[in-house]
């Protein structure tokens, strides 16, 4: 995960890349729709809430990690960009000139990793390295400085992040806590990481996960020849997030303790959420911020009046 460092760092040149991991082992909802499309309020789904959280946190780009089989339906709900909610209500003579678009990119898991180590945590790492490669090819000035991870399966009022934007987009890592627990405890709470965190988390998957072969039997050249049973192969694809994201820098990091947080990663937890007060608080943002919009191809005028905020 190497790239040219920026000669100097300013707040305006800081690139916070939002990562929304979707690809991974399925949950127990057993629906034909993707798990991330479960509704959490009227006309509002889990994945839309995660994207809105990235926008509220101040992300400059958002990367949704989902395979090609579900990407069309997810994109149909979300579109190609979302507006920064902080810039929407600023008073100005020409408000549209001060609005800020946050582009959304859809990234599939690499075929060589599918059914081998494609757990939810690997989606996070794959999204980070893809964001770095694509951005760095454009310019070192737009390469990500930090990655903000927003899990679709953790729900809370994300408006609480508004006043912590400066702490999120800083050199220190940032963690969302719920009842003093974080992602390292198995909670689907958001967090940021940089290059050092990426290396550590990727090492956890590579060292803890199994492959097809075992070193119990090798040939004369030291090449492994023993084959693991089918049920023991590629164990990394079943890793929980707390097995990969080992957090040991809470004391040196920026944190926020949120209220009314709920995990929604199983049917039972979903039932508990829908019967809680939180389900009446979390609602779809104003359509001026989030609705299906497409980016215009280069050199093509916008002919869709619905895509402008004035309508």
Image (tube, helix red, strand yellow):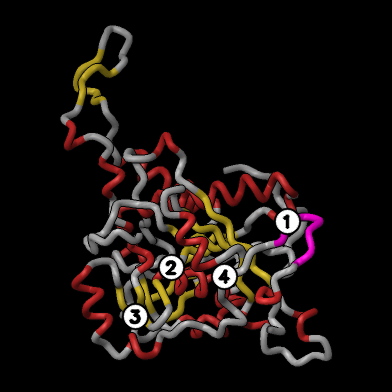
**Mark-to-mark CA distance, 4 and 3:** 27 Å
Give the labeled residue for mark 1: 297
Give the labeled residue for mark 4: 292
Label pair 2/3, CB-CB below 8 angstroms: no
Q: Earlier in the sequence, mark 4 or mark 3?
A: 3
Residue drawn at (40%, 49%), measured in percent from left and top?
Answer: 122
Left or right position of 42 against 129: left
Give the labeled residue for mark 2: 47
Callout 1: 10 Å neighbours few (<14), some, many (20+)?
few
**Mark-to-mark CA distance, 4 and 1:** 16 Å
Label pair 2/4, CB-CB below 8 angstroms: no
Give the labeled residue for mark 3: 261
Callout 2: 10 Å neighbours few (<14), some, many (20+)?
many
Image coordinates for residue 226, horizontal then vertical, percent: 21, 20
Q: Earlier in the sequence, mark 4 or mark 1?
A: 4
Image coordinates for residue 282, horizontal then vertical, percent: 41, 85
């Amino acid at each position: 995960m190497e790239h040219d460092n920026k000669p100097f760092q300013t707040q305006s040149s800081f690139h916070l890349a939002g990562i929304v991991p979707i690809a991974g082992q399925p949950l127990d909802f057993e629906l034909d729709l993707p798990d991330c499309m479960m509704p959490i309020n009227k006309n509002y789904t889990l994945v839309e809430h995660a994207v809105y959280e990235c926008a509220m946190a101040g992300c400059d780009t958002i990367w949704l990690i989902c395979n090609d089989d579900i990407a069309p339906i997810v994109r149909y709900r979300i579109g190609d960009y979302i507006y920064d909610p902080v810039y929407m209500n600023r008073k100005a003579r020409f408000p549209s000139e001060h609005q800020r678009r946050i582009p959304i990119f859809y990234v599939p898991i690499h075929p060589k990793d599918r059914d081998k180590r494609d757990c939810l945590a690997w989606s996070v790492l794959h999204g980070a390295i893809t964001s770095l490669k694509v951005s760095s090819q454009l310019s070192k000035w737009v390469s990500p400085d930090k990655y903000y991870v927003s899990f679709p399966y953790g729900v809370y009022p994300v408006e609480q992040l508004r006043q912590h934007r400066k702490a999120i987009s800083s050199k220190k890592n940032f963690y969302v806590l719920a009842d003093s627990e974080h992602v390292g405890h198995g909670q689907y709470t958001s967090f940021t990481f940089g290059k050092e965190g990426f290396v550590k988390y990727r090492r956890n998957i590579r060292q803890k996960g199994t492959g097809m072969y075992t070193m119990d039997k090798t040939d004369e050249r030291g090449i492994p020849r023993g084959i693991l049973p089918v049920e023991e192969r590629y164990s990394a694809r079943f890793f929980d997030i707390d097995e990969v994201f080992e957090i040991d820098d809470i004391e040196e990091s920026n944190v926020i303790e949120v209220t009314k947080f709920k995990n929604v990663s199983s049917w039972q937890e979903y039932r508990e959420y829908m019967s809680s007060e939180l389900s009446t608080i979390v609602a779809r943002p104003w359509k001026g911020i989030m609705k299906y919009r497409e980016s215009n191809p280069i050199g093509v005028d916008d002919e869709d009046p619905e895509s402008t905020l004035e309508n």
